[in-house]
Image (spheres, rainbow, N blue to C red):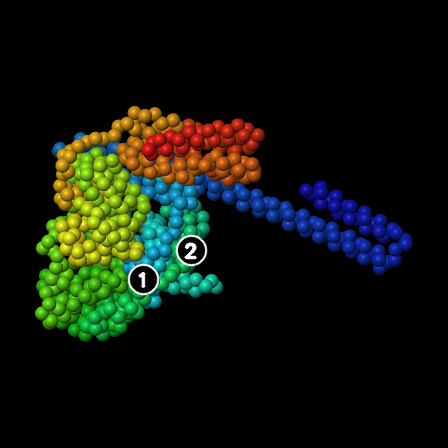
Amino acid sequence: MKALIISIISSSAIFAQNVSSKTSIGDSERLLWITLSVVSTLAFLFSLALILKLKKEHSKIQKKQDLSDATQNNVVAEMSENVYTIVQEAMNNESLLSKKIKNNPLDNDLIKVMNSEKKLLDMTSHLIEFLRLKSKKVEISNDHFKFVNLLNDISGGLLADYENSNIELIYDVDDDIPYILIGDTLKLSTILGNLLDYCVSGGARKITMKISKVSDFSMSKKLNFKISADVEIDVDESVFNYRYNENSKKYEGLGLYIAKDLSLLMDGEIVAKNTNSKEIELSLTIPYYMGKETQEQYRRRLDKRLTKKRVLIVDDNVNSSRSLEKIFLNFKYSVKIEMREEYLKNLSDFSMYDIVLLDERLFTNKAIESLKSCNCMVVSLGNLFSSSSTSVDGLVTMSLKKPFTQERVFQVLNEIYIPAVLKDTGVSVSKIEVNHVDKLKVHREVFHDALGITLDKFFDFKGKKILLVEDNIINQKVITNILGKSGIIISVANNGEEAVSLINSEQIFDLVLMDINMPIMDGYTATELIRANSNFDALPIIALSALTSTDEVNQMFISGMNGFIAKPLRKEKLYTAFLIFMGVSKFEHLKEIALENEKITYEGIDVVRGVQQMNGNSELYKEVLLEFKDAYGHSDEILQTLVNDHRFEQAKMLCLDLKGLSGSICADDMYGLSTEIHKQLIYKNYDLLPKYLLEYSVEISKLNKAIELYAA
């Protein structure tokens, strides 16, 4: 390169000298020619330097992109190994459990088995979601939903993974957020749940999610969910790339990858950054549409006797206190906040207030005596993610747990004041709340785990008709796969409105599994409408909810439900619920387990090993196979196009996907072939690709036929 530059300069000098020697050219013209020569040379050198710099930067970007592609696709390439490890852990724990069942306490072993099964379920759910995104099967719906149901769904999902973790989650909701929204609450819940899970798994203990309206240059209205967490992690946009950690043998970032992809499908945007204090901030901005009922209409439903109260809030979390203050200001209350230190130093005069909300750790003897002597209502502030509870002798307290929502505060106010109002009018509270309770068989306790329950045990209920009311397609698959080929007749409703319609259409069901938080119509409303018809007084309705706090459970029974099962659903609890409300089927322990699938040879896939990797759940394995076929069944055409267009980097990424996924479904021939093609692409043996492409087309066709045969 230096030689080239010297050559150019030398040529310019010779040219200038030649120009100078021309006697026919005047001095001014000669000077102009010399100047032009020098300027053009410098311009050329500048352009050359710029091109070299751009080429160097492009090379850096390409290397970075190659590294990113490799790390992103390692998660898929290693999928089968990790699935196998987790399944083996579950099987080993179950074996250990069976040996110790007669002589030793089971708590620790049961926890191991439950955790292993949950890991497998979480991974399978992510795998199905990943495949659905790849095959572009994910569709965004626009339905009416209650904003508070979205918040409850997020809390419940996080609670299922982090119960008793003592994390503090705060919802800081602006007062102009609509009560009813139109959108895809399920996808939105998944996005926010994955963002929060990233924070908690990274070590965060105090998390605030601020929800507000934002405006930009576009015409659409937008909501912003800003999540701030007290954990120091360096983040940038690369955090949304999924990768596989060779050291820990765990996947990293798959949840964030799914969240990012879903947000883009919803015309939204997620930004990750560090604050000035080095803590993390994840911000989701997404369009929204206002539903039928506005916030003002919701406020007008408030009983006049619930307004104009004086409130004292005592908590040690500023964000928590401020979020609660916002809610009470919506009710037009006069609010004072005291921090823990101020409260302990100078005990307040509680008689000045109508309602005192006190952190459950601050009920000192002096405070209790002072509260007993005044005429205020007392609310204990707890934490949904903590096992602690307050029980104070001689002092009646209501309970309110973080994260606070306006709906829950409204319920507490009703519980405090409305009973007194009804007593004044001589109306029976019990008749208004549960006038049907004497007609129902109600199981208020948590269903115990039936021991030794395998999937084929559900043959005990063959012939029973069940209505599953659930909006999450993956949860639908999980529940129907738990029941497998047991002979139970399952109908599915995607929301409460569909459920009410199916039940009123004179279809006869033996039991209803009712999700709580759904769009269009939630589980509470649907159950109340079903109970309004006396023909269905004896129909058992079991609630399904990740959020099973005391107030949620009370609301379930008030609406007319017979029992509840916490999500994620476990087959042991489901069996107990079936046994209590349906009894054993007339077929009595019929075990007609279909073994034909194991006897048939499916060219291209090892069905026996695939089912084993799914912990013996053949139906769940079938669903993964079908999703694979939808996503990659025509990948031979895509690969051919990529090679013809010389887009070899994209071809490599496709082969990495196929390599990992074919290993996951035990398609050994496809795994070997995609591995070989990937090597040829790495070594740039492009002239050998036509031969492999022909083999690939034959192999994917063979695999598609095997999947179709097995699914049938």
Which percent across, then down, holds residue 211?
A: 35, 61
| Among the 4 quarters of the image, the one containing residue 35 | bottom right
Mark 2 vs mark 1: which is more N-terminal? 1
Q: Position of residue 446 (x, y in %)?
A: 16, 48
Residue 515, percent from left and from top: 25, 51
Q: Name the residue under label 1.
A: 180
Q: Which part of the image, by quadrant, shows the C terminus?
A: top left
Q: Which residue is drawn at the image coordinates 16% and 73% (left, top)?
A: 351
Badge 2 marks a residue whose secondary structure is loop
Q: Nearer the viewer, residue 614 or 578?
A: 578
Disc 2 marks a residue whose amino acid type is Gly
- Tell me how far mark 2 sits from mark 1, CA to CA: 19 Å
Which residue is situated farthest in the right direction here? 24
The crowding category of the residue bearing disc 1, from other C-alpha atoms within 10 Å (few below 14, some 14 to 19, many at least 20), is many
Q: Which amino acid does label 1 sit on?
A: Ile
Q: Point out which mark residue 55 bears.
A: none
**Above-or-below relation of 641 to 568:** above
Q: Is mark 1 on a helix, strand or loop?
A: strand
Q: Is residue 652 left or right of residue 436?
A: right
2 or 1: mark nearer the eye: 1
Residue at (24% x, 53% y) in the render: 500
Q: Is residue 605 left or right of residue 38?
A: left
In the rendered image, which quarter contains the N terminus?
Answer: top right
Mark 2 = which residue?
268
Label 2 packing within 10 angstroms: few (<14), some (14-19), many (20+): some
Location of residue 67 in the rendering, given as x and y in whole percent from the top left corner: 49, 41
Can residue 193 be seen here? The reply is yes
